[in-house]
Amino acid sequence: MAEYYVHIEDDVITRQGYVREISDFINASGSSWSVLELSLVGAIGKVFRNDDLPKLVNLLTSFFEEQPVDYIFMYFKSITVQTKQYVRVPTVFKHIGAKCTLVNQT
């Protein structure tokens, strides 16, 4: 089984070499994280540890009707007591969708 789950929205395009860049970002981020962010906006790209997936799935299935996944991912980071934000800059994804669940974003 894989060590990580990479969440990528279906309305993005990727940069060439994005898999290597994500792998390098994971390796450079150390071990004290529960969520790595591959974009500054919403749920466009996130990395989760495979061991954390049962907790994440429980949260998603409990609140998917009340909250967008973007917010549930933020709650997950808070619940797992991750205080530092790990964001891959520049992003390896470009959002091409027409809608965004976050206010004032496209």
Image (cartoon, grey):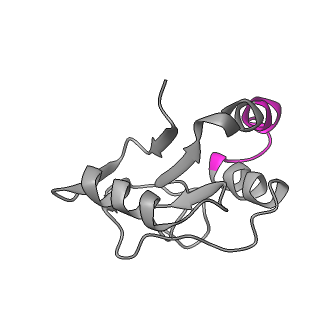
Q: Quadrant of residue 94?
A: bottom left
What percent of the width, then of the height, locates residue 11? 36, 47
What percent of the width, then of the height, locates residue 28? 44, 67
90 shown above or below 16: below
- At x 75% / y 51%, what residue is drawn? 76
Q: What residue span does the magenta drawing correspond to?
A: 58-69
Quadrant in which the C terminus is drawn: bottom left
The stretch drawn in magenta includes residue 61 = yes
Q: Quadrant of residue 71?
A: bottom right
**Total numbered labels placed on residues in the image:** 0
What percent of the width, then of the height, locates residue 97? 37, 53
Residue farthest along the top direction in this orientation: 1
- At x 36% / y 54%, what residue is drawn? 23
7 shown above or below 39: above
38 shown above or below 11: below
- At x 82% / y 32%, what residue is drawn? 62
User: In screen coordinates, is 81 left or right of 89?
Assistant: right
Q: Judge by depth and name the residue closer to the eye, 61 or 28.
A: 28
User: In screen coordinates, is 72 left or right of 46?
Assistant: right
Q: Judge by depth and name the residue closer to the eye, 50 or 44.
A: 50
What percent of the width, then of the height, locates residue 3? 51, 37
- At x 31% / y 63%, what residue is drawn? 92
User: In screen coordinates, is 91 left or right of 42?
Assistant: left
The stretch drawn in magenta includes residue 86 = no
